[in-house]
Amino acid sequence: MIRKSIFEIVLGDQWDDLCDVIKRHYSLKPFSDDYVCVRGEMSEVYHSAAAKLLIPFAILFGAVVPFRGSNVPIEVHYNSNTRNGNLYWDRIFKFSDKNHFHFKSHMEHIQGNEVVEFVRLGVGMRLKVTAEEGAIIFRDNGYIWRLLGVTIPIPVNLVLGSAYVEERSIDDSTFSMKMIIKHPLFGVMFRYAGKFKLDR
């Protein structure tokens, strides 16, 4: 039996709309030992003055990158899990030779085209996933806190704003990525952008 990848399940018929490099990037199958690594450079890692006030609280949950930088080398390691089928991420931002910041999370498929990306202490961001013009798009659908097996909606959007993430093909082996969290009153709170090469 041929198993579908995690995001082939999430996107359903839209999976075929993705460009090839994006498909290969998200090719990990659930309940497997599949592994993917991408390497690249973040042209920008930014947070606003208003966001800086929130960083001490966000660090507790491992929810943000607490530094600013430009032309930052980065590696992102993805692996599936043989026990629960979730997708695990380890993003390594290399701000200097000695300052490597790990931003770790894991992603669970909830229903339809919705996933939740969890950081520490059970805090998660719900994301609607779509394929648009060959790109994969993640749109914020609210935050939750999983506490003792109970899922509780939490109004983090009121403080941080809403998130948008996209990955677009550049050629057969490279793609661009951008992430923005924007508050309706305070404007852009966090913004990342970069280019990545996918190992074969």
Image: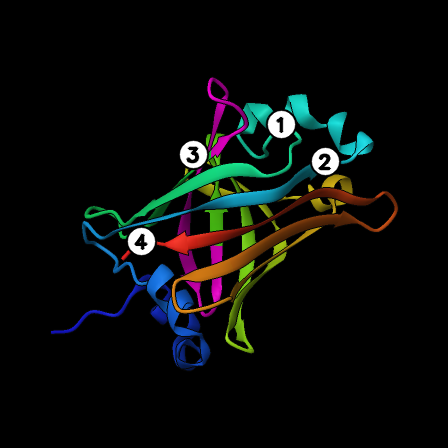
Taking the spot 56% from the left edge, 23% from the top edge, the residue there is 60
Q: Residues within 10 Å of mark 3 (few under 14, many from 20)?
A: few
Q: Which residue is mark 1?
A: 66
For the residues marked 2 and 4, what is the alpha-carbon distance in whole angstroms? 29 Å
Q: Residues within 10 Å of mark 1 (few under 14, many from 20)?
A: some
Q: Which residue is mark 2?
A: 47
State if disc 4 and disc 1 touch (CB < 8 Å): no
Three-letter amino acid code of the residue under disc 3 = Leu
Indicate whether residue 103 is drawn in magenta. yes
Vertical position of residue 56 compared to residue 63: above or below: above
Q: Residues within 10 Å of mark 4 (few under 14, many from 20)?
A: few
State if disc 2 and disc 1 touch (CB < 8 Å): yes
Q: Which residues are magenta?
A: 93-115
Vertical position of residue 198 compared to residue 2: above or below: above
Among the two numbered marks 3 and 1 on one chain, the one whose residue lies closer to the N terminus: 1
Dot label at residue 148: 3
Mark 2 or 4, which is nearer the eye? Answer: 4
